[in-house]
Image (cartoon, grey):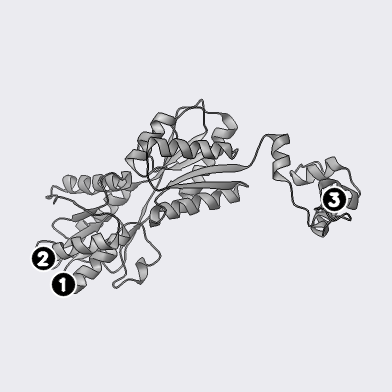
């Protein structure tokens, strides 16, 4: 409720109602251990009765901490970047931080610099940059300075700590799964070549085929969309030699499944299909899609943990790379190779 003069309640009002000092209220709000349980209960009751909310601006002036982290993201219309952003937001909230987000349509040195400058003006304490494209990593390499900053999906690192999913390992699992089912080789529909995740998935797919001593067809590049998967799927449906396809994301795999269905190609009886991401719809497709699961929640938690360590300990240590394992989710879209 408002204070007697109609203004919003302040800490002094809480102290007066609880019968304690201003300093005691501050200790309770900041989780200080040396406050008696009964006193804590009185202060919390006063806070609830008054409807008191902390003035974060005033607190920031005193503590020089805002508890706000800045996030720069690219193309959050796609499942992967959007899920990564959600995972970071959740992890920040669990750690007691708020997130200020800038989403960029184009990735240039100038746009990244402007985003960092904008967030700096918002008094954020540190930065997380979702950097799935090579241009983003190059932009960061030029801008790294005295800013606590973590890159997510930033390849081998632009001079800052990196947190990423094991794209190579996930692609290896998908390809090995199809070879174990007896397919003579595995065709690959890749993502755009400028995306680091697409590059890692091509690398893992190619490694497995080379190690197995089987021919590696030329990868075909899509743009992550169902439409591009559909167009490529129509072409692959005409090739009788195709019996297994590893698709670099589930959205393109959706297009492939439709193209095969329209072309009379049965999945998995004629061709097995494996995707990547494990989107929520994957298990409800016809047939349910075998895919590779990415733990976006763990990516968020590790990103926040690494950034908070930077804020706590400074930036003197060498940049580290934190890799989150992927996991194969077998479903009904993959099966033993058809008899020749």
Q: Residue 205: horizontal and vertical position, in percent? A: 23, 49
Estimate the spatial distance between the alpha carbons at disc 1 and disc 2, rounded to whole Å. Answer: 8 Å
Front residue of 160/321: it is: 160
Q: For numbered disc 2, what is the local secondary structure? A: loop
Estimate the spatial distance between the alpha carbons at disc 1 and disc 3, rounded to whole Å. Answer: 71 Å
Q: Quadrant of residue 313?
A: top right
Give the left or right position of residue 100, taking residue 50 as reference.
left
* Label 1: how many Cα within 10 Å (few below 14, some 14–19, many 20+): some
Q: Is residue 144 visible?
A: yes
Q: Which mark is residue 14?
A: 3
Estimate the spatial distance between the alpha carbons at disc 3 and disc 2, rounded to whole Å. Answer: 75 Å
Q: Disc 1 marks which residue?
A: 263
Q: Disc 2 marks which residue?
A: 238
The numbered mark, 3 or 2, whose residue comes first in the sequence reads: 3
Q: Is residue 159 visible?
A: no
**As displayed, is residue 294 above or below residue 331?**
above
Q: Contact (CB < 8 A) between labels 1 and 2?
A: yes
Image quadrant occupied by the N terminus = bottom right
Q: For numbered disc 3, what is the local secondary structure? A: helix
Q: Contact (CB < 8 A) between labels 3 and 2?
A: no
Which residue is pictured at 84% across the width and 40% down the height?
Answer: 23
Give the left or right position of residue 288, taking residue 5 as reference.
left
Q: How many marks?
A: 3
The numbered mark, 1 or 3, whose residue comes first in the sequence reads: 3
* Label 3: how many Cα within 10 Å (few below 14, some 14–19, many 20+): many
Which residue is pictured at 69% across the width and 38% down the height?
Answer: 60
The numbered mark, 1 or 2, whose residue comes first in the sequence reads: 2
Q: Which mark is residue 97?
A: none
Give the left or right position of residue 245, taking residue 26 as reference.
left
Q: Residue 325: horizontal and vertical position, in percent? A: 39, 48
């Amino acid at each position: 409720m408002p204070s007697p003069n109609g203004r919003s309640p302040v800490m002094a009002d809480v102290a007066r109602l609880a019968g304690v000092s201003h300093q005691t209220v501050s200790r309770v709000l900041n989780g200080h251990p040396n406050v008696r349980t009964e006193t804590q209960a009185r202060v919390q009751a006063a806070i609830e009765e008054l409807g008191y909310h902390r003035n974060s601006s005033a607190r920031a002036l005193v503590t020089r901490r805002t508890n706000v982290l800045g996030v720069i993201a690219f193309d959050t219309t796609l499942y992967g970047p959007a899920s990564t952003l959600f995972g970071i937001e959740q992890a920040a909230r669990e750690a007691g931080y708020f997130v200020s987000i800038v989403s960029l349509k184009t990735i240039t040195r100038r746009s990244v610099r402007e985003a960092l400058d904008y967030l700096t003006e918002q008094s954020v304490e540190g930065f997380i940059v979702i950097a799935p494209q090579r241009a983003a990593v190059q932009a960061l390499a030029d801008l790294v300075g005295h800013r606590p900053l973590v890159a997510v999906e930033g390849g081998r690192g632009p001079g800052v700590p990196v947190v990423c999913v094991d794209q190579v390992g996930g692609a290896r699992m998908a390809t090995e799964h199809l070879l174990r089912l007896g397919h003579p080789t595995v065709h690959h529909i890749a993502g755009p070549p400028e995306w680091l995740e697409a590059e890692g998935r091509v690398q893992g797919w190619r490694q497995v085929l080379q190690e197995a001593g089987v021919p590696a067809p030329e990868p075909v590049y899509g743009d992550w969309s169902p439409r591009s998967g559909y167009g490529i799927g129509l072409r692959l449906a005409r090739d009788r030699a195709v019996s297994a396809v590893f698709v670099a994301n589930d959205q393109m795999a959706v297009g492939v499944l439709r193209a095969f269905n329209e072309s009379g190609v049965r999945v998995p009886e004629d061709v097995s299909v494996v995707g990547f991401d494990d989107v929520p719809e994957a298990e409800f497709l016809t047939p349910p899609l075998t895919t590779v699961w990415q733990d976006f929640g763990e990516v968020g938690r590790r990103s926040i943990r690494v950034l908070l360590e930077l804020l706590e300990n400074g930036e003197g240590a060498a940049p580290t790379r934190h890799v989150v394992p992927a996991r194969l989710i077998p479903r009904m879209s993959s099966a033993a190779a058809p008899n020749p």
